Image (cartoon, rainbow, N blue to C red):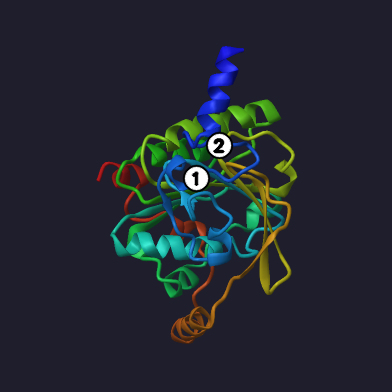
Amino acid sequence: MRAATALFSLFSSGGAPVWRADERPADETVGPVLPSGFAELDRELPGGGWPQGQLTELLLADAGIGELSLLAPALAQLAQVKRSTVWVLPPDGTRGIEAQAMPYAPALAAAGVDLMRTIFVQPATPREGLWAIEQALRAQHLGAVIGWLPPAGTADSDFKALRRLHLLAQRHSSLAFVLRATRHAAAPSPAVLRLQLASDGRALEAVVLKRRGRPLLEPVALTLHPAHWAAAQAATEQLTPNVQPASKTSLLAARSLQALLDH
């Protein structure tokens, strides 16, 4: 009883504030972040941006609906400070929406991403894909790691794989994104931030499934293609009319993943 009275006296007299689970945490309780480049999204993200040194999970209704454009502003910021990015694509032979997950190099370049500091990894098997994501997260000098999580077979094994990536992401301050299909939205995840993405062709709708603090009931609508991006991409396509989406051959860069990690 005395303890309860003391606590009441402390907080009623202007003592230390108490964080409540239904409130967004104060910025000082959140680790470092990098602005997403979308003001309307940053207003809803704890700290005002993508969490660094934490795992973020993006759930997609379809591949190519705008996930590249969503991440491009942050990747462009990393390019300005000369930090590299690793993309780990779905393994060969993957079916479903993951089979369409091929980044388009001219679009990345038009958005300000430094392709000389970007490496794409095309694993042959799900096991190699998970290994590649894990090894990239171990590299201190990388700015971002973006990988499609290969299905492990069961919800429990998927969670264990995510948990391992979550722990590895906390070792450094890089951005860590795991991409998965929307069908996994109801599955548990250790990621500190989970967004479910869908597109109507003009805007990207981001539903915040999980974040620190109170839940967000309304989706966030994002305009994906500002005018200067569209102009830059059109100019790029005119200069390189025969450029195709990245193929398996072009994904195997001259530098191996291990060489990049050892840099």
Q: Which residue is mark 2?
A: 19
Residue furthest top in the image: 1
- Give how far across and how far down residue 67 sits, in percent: 58, 60
Instruction: Give x and y (percent) for residue 138.
Output: 37, 36
Which residue sits at x=42%, y=41%?
Answer: 53
Identify the residue at image location x=37%, y=44%.
173
Disc 1 target residue: 26
Whether residue 228 is visible here, answered yes or no, is yes
Q: Amino acid at mark 1?
A: Ala
**In this picture, is 53 found above or below 107?**
above
Q: Which residue extends farthest left?
A: 263
- The local secondary structure at tag 1 comes to loop
Rendered view: 94 above or below 171: below
Tag 2: residue type? Trp
Question: 30 or 227: which is nearer to us?
Answer: 30
Query: Is tag 2's residue or tag 1's residue first in the polypeptide sequence?
Result: 2
The answer to whether mark 2 and mark 1 are in CB contact below 8 A is: yes
Q: Residue at x 72, y 43 (%)?
A: 185
Badge 2 density bin: few <14, some 14–19, many ≥20, Cα 10 Å: few
* Residue 202 vertical position relative to residue 248 in the rendered view, above or below: below
Q: Depth check: 33 or 247 in front? A: 33
Secondary structure under tag 2 reads loop
